[in-house]
Amino acid sequence: MNRITRLNGGGEMHVIVVYDVPSERTRIYRKLLRRRLEHLQQSVFYGELTEGQVTSMKNEIEDRLVPEDEVVIFESTNPASFDFETYGASDDPGSRFT
């Protein structure tokens, strides 16, 4: 199944967050990110946030970081730059891991 998704409307910043952390620390980031973003895949979240919400989220992430954690945040004010395609037997975004 191939699905094209476009993030648009509503928010000011379009955000994708991915993380690579030790398994015992995934719960920390999953809980933090679910409060603001949609859970797309195990360590991938996306959504629309205000600039203030993005700043707040970044501060919370920085407060929880330890040396072996890696978090990458992609952000844009242009929704057209965040088209993406999903391949495979996936349900609607967020449905498998919420």
Image: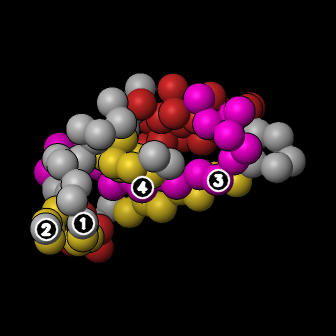
Secondary structure under the numbered disc 4 in the rendered image: strand
Q: Which circle marks residue 16 in the picture?
A: 4
Residue 56 in view: no
Q: Give the mark, 2 or 4, whose residue is nearer the N terminus.
A: 2
* Residue located 51% across and 26% down the image: 31
Q: Which mark lies nearer to you, 3 or 4?
A: 3
The quadrant of the picture occupied by the C terminus is top left
Q: CA distance from mark 3 to mark 2?
A: 26 Å
Q: Which residues are magenta?
A: 9-27
Name the side, left or right, on which 34 lies relative to 61. left
Secondary structure under the numbered disc 3 in the rendered image: strand
Q: CA distance from mark 1 to mark 3?
A: 22 Å
Residue 80 in view: yes
Q: Nearer the viewer, residue 27 or 16?
A: 27
Mark 4: amino acid: Ile
Q: Which circle marks residue 20 in the picture?
A: 3
The quadrant of the picture occupied by the N terminus is bottom left
Hey, which quadrant is residue 57 in on the image?
Answer: top right
Residue identifier under label 1: 88
Mark 2: amino acid: Met
Q: CA distance from mark 1 to mark 4?
A: 20 Å
